[in-house]
Amino acid sequence: MAIPLSAIIAAVFLQTLWGANTVAIKLGLEAFPPLWSAFFRFLIGAGCILIYAQCRGIRLRPESGEWLGILAGAALFIIQIAAMNFGISMTTGMSASVLLSTFPLFAAVTSHFVIANDRLTVAKTAGLCIAFFGVAIVLTDGRMPDVASLGWGNLITLLAAALLGSRQVFNATLVRRIDPFRVIYWQMVLSLPVFAGSGALLETIAWENAGWVPLAGLAYQGVVIAGFGFMIVAYFLKLYSPSVMLSFGFISPVSGVALSAVLLSESFTWPLGAGMVAVAAGLIIITRSDRNGAT
């Protein structure tokens, strides 16, 4: 489906902001461990959506027949967010930015089997192969692969990317029959008791570290990403196929890596650079194939 210039500009801007989310999570983790970080993020995000819905007269209460899909989406949402936060806490911001940016690849594969008229083509498959070659470089740090070089943080982050891609496709099917604001809002709300309960049992907030930097990281995650960003994504998924819109994800690793270098003082290595280029190239090929109708 053709995408108007305004939507392309919005998608590029959103992906730039999304790349910064990894850095914001890393900063927030200095005081708020993974589960508590997720709780506060979506408490803020759900509040933003509630305020917007009230101002616009959008009804957030689901119909009786909508609850099953919302509950299933919430379960996937909780698992994906938990995996993402734990993965990011165990690896660098740069590596996490590149690995998380692969979620459009998983969305394209999932969409092939779930969404009608959104099939993998030869060009898309080539793009997927190139991008996953980049992922392999990042995971192994340019060395012969072994368990130690892969790193649990990288593997968990890649799992989170796969879950995110699948969740985006699942949400794309939901928003065709359920208002996207209800889908996103209730996924956040239903996650809150799970994250708060598990956080209280398993984690301790380092209040002594809760200065303005981790608080700013939480605010960015909650307002910019969970509030503004999720609403825009839900709106786009209602209009365009997942593999088309999410293909603009090649921008987010560049943003995330650059900001990790500046704000987290992380070192840029050649395997990371090569992996980032390969992932971006693969996503660009997928984008062009969708635009041109390549087979």
Image (cartoon, rainbow, N blue to C red):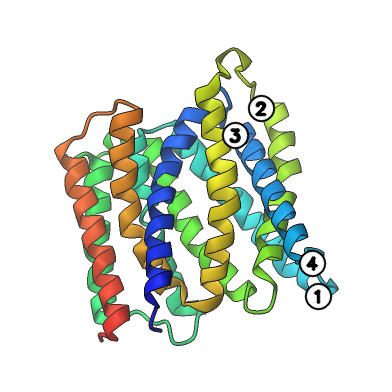
Mark 3–mark 2 Cα distance, whole angstroms, equals 13 Å
Q: Are marks 1 and 2 in contact (CB under 8 Å)?
A: no
Q: Would you name the residue on which mark 3 appears? A: 37
- Which picture quadrant has residue 202? top right
- Which picture quadrant has residue 247? bottom left
Mark 1–mark 2 Cα distance, whole angstroms, equals 35 Å
Mark 1–mark 3 Cα distance, whole angstroms, equals 32 Å
Mark 1–mark 4 Cα distance, whole angstroms, equals 15 Å
Q: Identify which residue is drawn at 71% across, 47% down.
A: 47
* Label 1: how many Cα within 10 Å (few below 14, some 14–19, many 20+): few
**In this view, the mark in front (4 or 2):** 4
Q: Give me the disc on residue 59.
A: 4
Image quadrant for the N terminus?
bottom left
Q: Would you name the residue on which mark 2 appears? A: 202
User: Please, what secondary structure does the residue beneath circle 3 have?
Assistant: helix
Q: Are marks 1 and 3 in contact (CB under 8 Å)?
A: no
Q: Identify which residue is drawn at 24% across, 80% down.
A: 122
Q: Give me the disc on residue 65.
A: 1
